[in-house]
Image (cartoon, helix red, strand yellow):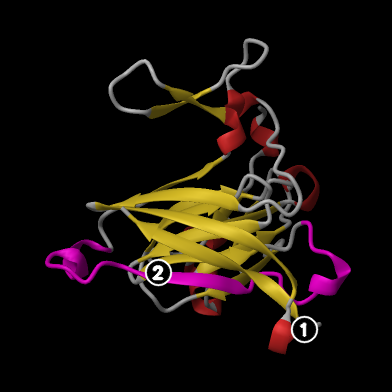
Amino acid sequence: MDPKDVQLRNFDRPVQAVALSPEYKSDRAYLSGGQAGNLILTIGGQVGRSANATTISTAAAASGWLGSLGLGANTGTDKVLHSGEGIISTIKWSLSGRYVLWVNEQGIKVMRSNLHLESADAGFEWKRMSHRDKPNRDGWDEMAGVWKARAEWVDRDNLEIDEDSTTVSLKPKVTNGKPPGLSKPTTKKGKHEEVVVGWGDTVWLFRVYPGGVGTGKEAGERKIGRVEVITM
């Protein structure tokens, strides 16, 4: 709302996706990625200041345009969570904040975030839960880094069936005169979450199930969770 609240951060390479933590007001964290191929977690940084990311080289920091303005002092921290699989085009936190989905040139991935972790789940933060390869079809190798994937986490409790048409469709409910996007998501503990991803000529539905204590041969072992994937 005010220019003095803006933070400018230089990552040295073009950034194509940014996603604020659902708890940004308190944790000042966000994820970003782009042509460098790094999924980066940034925490902190002073508002009203410009800074170079701590992930870029010392030489780049010294010669960067922020440094030439005398604004290159590093504030905040940056951590690479994943890298080496090409351009990152999309990053999306789940409605509960427990999961993060991102898309790079190789495929679609889901990880557990650091939010709402129980004490028994310590160590699961930022651990990858699933990977889905891009389709092995003509054109995909050339276009995977160009097509920007679109991802939307879906709350089925906030959807209703419209049976007035010949085909069944989903439309958002309006509660108290407000569209659902204006109210805080209320994803129940233990309930799976769903995300729809459209990328190129293909659509995927991911169902992400929470972890728990294993059974059978894995009895007593804590599990991070599982992901079911449907290609449409």
Residue 55 in view: no
Mark 2 = which residue?
Answer: 132
Q: Is residue 15 left or right of residue 215?
A: left
Q: Is residue 81 above or below residue 172?
A: below
Please state the horizontal and vertical placement of residue 47, each as a whole percent of the image: 71, 45
Could you tell whether 44 is left or right of 153 in the image?
Answer: right
The residue sitting at 77% across, 83% down in the picture is 221
Q: Give the CA distance from mark 2 to mark 1.
A: 28 Å
Front in this rendered view, residue 9 or 148: 148
Q: Is residue 124 magenta?
A: yes
Relative to residue 213, is residue 175 depicted above or below? above
Coordinates of residue 11 in the picture (x, y in percent):
50, 62
- Secondary element under disc 2, as helix, strand or loop, is strand
**Residue 223 shows in this picture:** yes
| Observer-nearest of 154 and 83 | 154
Q: Which residues are magenta?
A: 116-144
Residue 219: assigned label: 1
Q: Nearer the viewer, residue 111 or 163?
A: 163
The N terminus lies in quadrant: top right
The residue that appears at 52% across and 67% down in the rendered structure is 39
Residue 204 x, y percent position in the rendering = 37, 54
Q: Which mark is residue 80?
A: none
The earlier-in-sequence mark between 2 and 1 is: 2
Farthest residue, direction left: 138
Q: Looking at this view, name the residue that lies furthest to the top.
A: 177
Q: Residues within 10 Å of mark 2 (few under 14, many from 20)?
A: some
Q: Nearer the viewer, mark 2 or mark 1?
A: 1
Amino acid type of the residue that numbered disc 1 sits on in the rendered structure: Ala
Image location (x, y in percent) of residue 67? 56, 62
Query: In front here: 33 or 137?
Result: 137
Mark 1, Cα crowd under 10 Å, few <14 / some 14-19 / many 20+, is few
